[in-house]
Image (tube, helix red, strand yellow):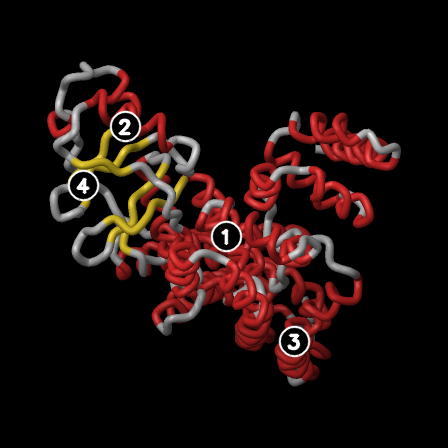
Amino acid sequence: MAEQIEQRYQTIQFLSDLLHSGQDTEFIESFESLHDFEMAQVYADLPEQFRSVAWRLLSIDILARVFDNLDIDEVDIVKLLQELPPQRGVLVLQEMYADNEADLLQEMPARLVATYLSLMSKSEADTVRKLIDYDEQTAGSLMSTEYLAVEEELHVDEVMRLVKKQALAAESISYVYVLDLQERLAGVISLRDLLTHSDNLAVSEITNDRIISVKAGDDQEDVAQIVADYNFLSIPVTDDENRLLGVITVDDIVDVIDEEAVEDYSGLAAVNVSQINDTPWHSAIKRIPWLIALLVLGMATATLISSYDQLVQQASILAAFISLITGTAGNAGTQALALAVRRIAVGSDNSGWKNFFSEILAGIIVGMATGFSVFVIVAIWKHNSILGFAVGLAMTMAIIVANLAGYLIPVLIDKMGFDPAVASGPFITTLSDLTSVLIYFNVAQLFISHFVGR
């Protein structure tokens, strides 16, 4: 990775030198020889004074490829587009794939969207408006309207001619979708099928009519799971009458998987990890609210501990095991949380009750194994088996409770219609601290007369 970054900086410096010295032709040739992803990264990182020269030299097609490959979450893509005059900017938008165009427009203020739409042709503007209207994180917001579709009465040679004619405009040509006379999705043909069958064969004879499709309102995470399960390169999006609205390609699915992973990890860490290049100030501002909230919950734990001052004064050795029990219980709760969030995200073959009882059993096994280990260590270390038993029993109970909390809280949050990832790791850990301290001191109180003074 470090080597790639260094190579990119060298490329930026080389291209900047070409622009600075007025070697326009050499710049165009060098820039266009880059991979599409590299073009996007290099263009975004060029100093602004050189970008103002670059967009004048580059064709609309190349600029569209640049903006198609820019990551909205990492680059201020709207600012980059605004560096172009509106008339040139709208040409770039129209050359982009429709789903990427819609994503870019959704990042803009309404006034700017209206400006670009007013400069587009009516048909283009209507298409984009439909895509913008779909809710974020749904299949409709991901789909592209550039796909290959043919009528079912055509023959293989006719379809191949259409593929060659439309290939440049389509975002993906891996599949050709077959429509019936009512323009409903009747089936799909892979490019391999077209290449391996006779030219005079009717496409209806090689059409796969077992279609896996999604609706425009389906959640993007569910769509990503289907594509992953079936190893599709693209998947069709249909309306309630099975009319083809668009297709979602695997590159968009990869973005969804990355987005969902970042979202889940952000929840587990209680911090937004998508913006890795934030300034120290913005990074701190995002972390402080959660930390303050957790601090308040942590104060409840501190207050609880202080209420057992007399117990600790009777047996000061109890203080030595507080962090051991709270830390281990917190870790167990975080493990259960991560597993529960994953089950919710990808689905589980087991019923909810089966997962519940499975988690209870797992908590009991983990708790007993850990509790027994602590019992042996403390009994040998302090030469006091009663103290070891008390600490081990408290550890067992604390882990079982933390395990259950780690499983139940995200499940309940999901049932309420919220993202289960908000049940963050730090929150579960802090909550486990509270319950484990309560369990520990109550168990210790039961056995204190047996190990004090021994």
Tell me the number on the disc at residue 179: 4
Q: Would you identify the image quadrant in which residue 12 lies?
A: top right
Tell me what residue is drawn at x 63 percent, y 77 percent: 293
Which mark's residue is nearer the viewer, 3 or 4? 4
Tell me the number on the disc at residue 101: 1
- Residue type at tag 4: Leu
Mark 1 to mark 3: distance in Å?
46 Å
The C terminus - image quarter: bottom right
State whether residue 179 appears in this view: yes
- Residue type at tag 1: Glu
Which mark's residue is nearer the viewer, 1 or 3? 1
Q: Which of these two is toward me, 118 or 217? A: 118
The picture places residue 415, in percent across and down from the top left corner, at 34, 70
In this rendering, would 121 be left or right of 67?
left
Q: Does dot 4 land on a helix, a strand or a loop?
A: strand
Q: Which of these two is toward me, 445 or 94? A: 94
The picture places residue 49, in percent across and down from the top left corner, at 82, 48
Earlier sequence position, callout 1 versus callout 3: 1
Earlier sequence position, callout 3 versus callout 4: 4
